[in-house]
């Protein structure tokens, strides 16, 4: 998808895979090339709904500025209600000031991120965390229960937690492998 996937307020996008074999499983590749838009999630000043991933190969990128790979776009009204990952191969890369998975810049409607399994790679951009906050948002929260993951923050952002000038939320890690 070349313009990103927006999840409407109140809506839920649920992704399943029919196979655990990476060569045959279903794939979604979504890139948002414009400023303010997440690869999957919200747009500028827009509160996105819920994303649930049960499997498949998901690659989401925001390549403009200010948005998360998966999560919130840019602005005061932006954010995302919830992101839940049960399995699959998930790769999320943020635009400048955004988190890989979580908030874009100035999100004031933070959501929750829960990871139960799968392989998750989340890369924040400048001022963004790998997982949770972009630059200057209120505190996204989350729980990591299992799975295998790599979370890399950009300059001035944590791997897991807050981005630059961010108010970090609670992120207990109960299991999983790095």
Image (tube, rainbow, N blue to C red):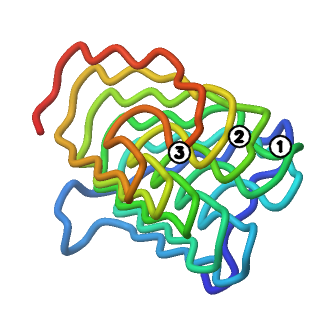
Label 1 neighbour load within 10 Å: few <14, some 14-19, many 20+: many
- Dot 2: element: strand
Residue at the (55%, 69%) spot, across then down? 95
- Dot 1: element: strand
Frontmost of labels 3 and 1 is 3
Mark number, residue 164: 3
Provide residue 172's location: percent of width, then percent of height. 34, 14
**Is 77 in front, or is 11?**
77
Label 2 neighbour load within 10 Å: few <14, some 14-19, many 20+: many
Most extreme residue toward the left, as rendered?
177
Could you tell me if the residues under marks 1 and 2 are in contact, i.e. CB atoms within 8 Å?
yes
Tag 1 residue: 47
Alpha-carbon distance for marks 2 and 3?
19 Å
Sooner in the amino-acid sequence: mark 3 or mark 1: 1
Frontmost of labels 2 and 3 is 3
Tag 2 residue: 80
Residue at the (43%, 46%) spot, across then down? 129
């Amino acid at each position: 998808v070349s313009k990103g996937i927006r999840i409407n307020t109140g809506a839920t996008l649920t992704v399943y895979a029919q196979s655990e074999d990476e060569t045959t499983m279903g794939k979604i590749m979504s890139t948002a090339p414009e400023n303010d838009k997440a690869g999957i999630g919200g747009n500028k000043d827009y509160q996105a709904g819920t994303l649930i991933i049960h499997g498949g190969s998901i690659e989401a990128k925001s390549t403009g500025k200010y948005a998360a790979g998966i999560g919130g776009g840019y602005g005061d009204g932006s954010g995302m209600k919830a992101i839940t990952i049960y399995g699959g191969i998930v790769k999320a890369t943020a635009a400048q000031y955004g988190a890989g998975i979580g908030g874009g810049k100035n999100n004031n409607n933070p959501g929750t991120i829960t990871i139960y399994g799968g392989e998750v790679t989340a890369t924040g951009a400048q001022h963004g965390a790998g997982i949770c906050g972009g630059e200057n948002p209120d505190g996204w929260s989350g729980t990591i229960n299992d799975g295998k993951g790599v979370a890399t923050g950009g300059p001035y952002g944590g791997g897991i937690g807050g981005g630059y000038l961010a108010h970090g939320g609670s992120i207990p890690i109960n299991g999983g492998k790095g």
